[in-house]
Amino acid sequence: MLSKVIEQALNDQIRVEAESSQIYLAMACWAEVQGFEGVAQFMYAHSDEERMHMLKLVKFVNERGGHAHISDLKEPPAKFGSFKDMFQTLFDHEVVVSKTINDLVHITLQEKDYATHNFLQWYVSEQIEEEALARNILDKINLIGDDKGGLYLFDNDVKQIVAQSATTTQE
């Protein structure tokens, strides 16, 4: 059984994950309109992944005797200026999500809810991966600079990341 404190904190995280999905979706739309198919595929795939993170939390809350709530979401931006700006926004967002997960883990320890604490360890590991991936992509974009040929090659490289991720997920 979840305490009301834990239930509310998990519902807050459900909203964070849903908003993350929306942010990735908005980035996918922007990249697609800019003609960057690989980046758009990457963002669409990550939007789906964030939605799955949300659903995992929803099911956990409901299975533990709580009631998951689906709330309204903040509208994400529709334009991002440049790819560097977009990926910087993405990285900054992932850092914020990591903080919310860490805060949630802290609450579970305060509440002595070790089952939820254990459940959240998957999210802790996932956030380490998400931040590292965003940082890695941002580093590549910084190396490319304003070189249009480099951005074209980067877009193709991102297609490979999506393909590798899909293969890993299916295994």
Image (cartoon, helix red, strand yellow):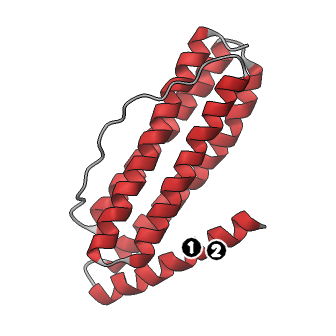
Pick the front one: 160 or 30: 30
Q: Which residue is mark 1?
A: 161
Pick the front one: 20 or 145: 20
* 119 left or right of 67 in image: right
Q: Residue at x 67, y 32 (%)?
A: 59
Where residue 17 appears, as percent x and y from the top left, is: 50, 40
Q: Amino acid at mark 2?
A: Gln
* 145 left or right of 44 in image: left
Quarter of the image that includes the C terminus: bottom right
* 90 left or right of 82 in image: right
- Would residue 127 be seen by someone viewing this image from the given angle? no
In this picture, is 20 found above or below 130? Answer: above
Query: SS class of the residue under badge 2?
Result: helix
Query: Disc 2 and disc 1: Cα gap in Å?
Result: 5 Å
Quarter of the image that includes the N terminus: top right
Where residue 134 appears, as percent x and y from the top left, is: 47, 59
* Marks 2 and 1 in Cβ contact (< 8 Å): yes
Q: Which residue is mark 2?
A: 164
Q: Amino acid at mark 1?
A: Ile
